[in-house]
Amino acid sequence: MSFSLGQVDWMPSPPLVPEDGPIDFDHLHRMTLGDDSLEREVLAMFAGQAAELAASLAQLPPNAAILAHKLKGSARAIGAIHVAVAAADLETALRKGADPAEPRVTLNDTVNQVCQAIDAILRRS
């Protein structure tokens, strides 16, 4: 049996950065299969994890690059693309031995923005 690219139904890739805020809700909706209660649960878990990891990263522990990588993956999974990009920048700086000050500030800012957005969402009934 041969495979032909003409047989594949291609779907467009999601945008790399959400156009209207700190979370790509279309991505989150796809990842949670449209389950609103699951979306809320995932957002709450991410907000807690992101705040915890950002606080740990503020101290630059020896495993900071690993923590940044973990945050990057979690952020990508829920559509917090700005957090993922900032975490990737910090991870890269740490792995290359570059000054992590600026990427760390950017990461803190993006985590704060996404946590505020999530808090507003979760307060809605």
Image (spheres, rainbow, N blue to C red):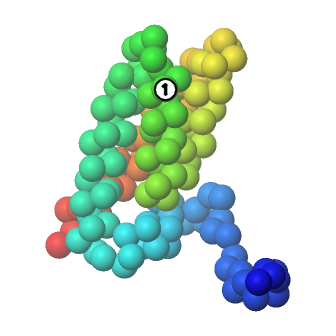
Measured from the top left, where is residue 27 in percent x and y?
Answer: 50, 68
Residue at 69% of width from left, 17% of height from top?
96
Say above or below: 108 vs 83: above
**Occupied quadrant, residue 122:** bottom left
Quarter of the image for residue 15 reads bottom right
- Quadrant placement of the N terminus: bottom right
Could you tell me how many numbered marks the image carries?
A: 1
Q: Position of residue 84 (x, y in %)?
A: 54, 44
**Is the residue marked by circle 1 packed among few (<14), some (14-19), or many (20+) residues within 10 Å?**
some
Q: Residue furthest front?
A: 1
Of residues 3 and 36, which is closer to you in this image?
3
Residue 72 visible somewhere in the drawing:
yes
**60, above or below 12, in the image:** above
As shown in the figure, which amino acid type bears the numbered disc 1?
A: Ile
Give the side of residue 2 with respect to residue 64, left or right. right
Give the residue pinned by disc 1: 66
Q: Is residue 120 visible?
A: no
In the figure, 88 relative to 101: above or below? below
Q: Residue furthest left?
A: 125
